[in-house]
Image: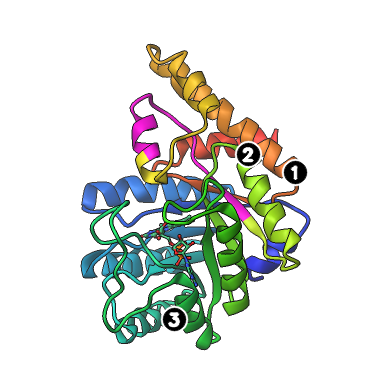
Amino acid sequence: TSIPDLLAASQTAFSFEFFPPKDDAAEEVLWDSIRRVEAVQPAFISVTYGAGGTTRDRTVRVTSRIEHETSLRTMAHLTCVGSSVAELREVLRAYAGAGIRNVLALRGDPAGGLGQPWTPHPEGLDHAEDLVRLVAESEEFTVGVAAFPDKHPESPSLEHDAEVLVRKADAGASFAITQMVTDVDAYLRLRDLVAASGRAIPIVPGLMPVTAHGQLQRMTALNGQPLAREVIERIEAVKDDKDAVRREGIDIATEHAQRLIDEGAPGVHFITMNRSTATVEVWERLRG
Ligand code: FAD
């Protein structure tokens, strides 16, 4: 069964996101998390892609190992950052050779970091939409793309983001995954804008439970946007008690996930930061 088919099924498709570990110790933490996630039989797991050649090799290696050593369906992320079209084709050949059949096609953030101007590689691609076309060319992959309920930092409006999403669907993407949702209404606004355009594409909300007070700032940086006021206030209210912060973070994520599911979201994509305990706890609570 393909990811789009799983998303079209009546049951919510749960998925989990990991990043390639930097060293042996981090790899052990990752595998511990992978095994925990494997036990809940998610629809798929995904592995992110960083800038530069070394993380590229790590994404291929880790995704390939998960594909071969576990029962999990995998999706590898891919970005246009710093690569020519020929290099992107090479990565796709490596993905295909490793048995990876699902790719999340992204532009990537500007090499200088969020807020810096985006400059494409001289022989590369300018928009995710172009990468979707390149990945879809080979017919070996299903293609997913990114979506931004809080508006992409470089975008003039949410309407523009909805148009971009429709263009990516027209280019061959069959599903989208959002940045971490901290305001469920924002997700619903984007989903309804896309639906109103008459172009249906399943949009899976990304979720990440807050597990420590210090994470609030890191999550804001990761999202490129301020988190929802409700989330900040609820975490701030218990910030002096570590256990209470974790409990509150898991409560918030569970409530958000439940509302998203009730509103008809096709799945929930958990961002694990390679430590899956909190996300699996949310999953267990949703299962009742
Ligand atoms: P695009 O769709 O190209 O959009 C980028 C900007 O250009 C937007 O402002 C958009 O409005 C505008 N735009 C797009 N197409 C057009 C057009 N035709 N005409 C005019 N304007 C246009 N980054 C990583 O480096 N590695 C990862 O593994 C990774 N995983 C991610 C997973 C998810 C679920 C999400 C939501 C993001 C992820 N990112 C990752 C971050 C992502 O690469 C950045 O947010 C990036 O800035 C935007 O990527 P995109 O694919 O949405 O780009």
Q: Earlier in the sequence, mark 3 or mark 1?
A: 3
**Where's the N terminus, which quadrant?**
bottom right
Spatial CA span between label 1 and label 2: 10 Å
Near mark 3 (Cα within 10 A), the count class, few <14, some 14-19 or many ≥20, is some
Residue drawn 38% across and 26% down? 212
Q: Are marks 3 and 1 in contact (CB under 8 Å)?
A: no
The mark closer to the camera, 3 or 1, is 1
Spatial CA span between label 3 and label 1: 35 Å
Locate residue 275, reporting x and y percent.
Answer: 40, 41
Any mark on residue 212, and which? none
Verify whether residue 215 appears in magenta: yes
* Rendering quadrant holding ligand 1: bottom left
> Above or below — where is 74 with respect to 246?
below
Any mark on residue 96, and which? 3
Residue at numbered disc 1: 263
Verify whether residue 116 appears in magenta: no
Q: Quadrant of residue 94?
A: bottom left
94 and 175: which is toward the camera: 175
Q: At label 2, which amino acid type do we have?
A: Val
Q: Is residue 261 visible?
A: yes
Residue at numbered disc 2: 184
Locate residue 110, reporting x and y percent.
Answer: 30, 61
Q: Quadrant of residue 216?
A: top left
Which residue range is magenta in the image? 204-220
Q: Earlier in the sequence, mark 3 or mark 2?
A: 3
Q: At label 1, which amino acid type do we have?
A: Glu
Q: Are marks 1 and 2 in contact (CB under 8 Å)?
A: yes
> Above or below — where is 188 with respect to 5?
above
Q: Earlier in the sequence, mark 1 or mark 2?
A: 2
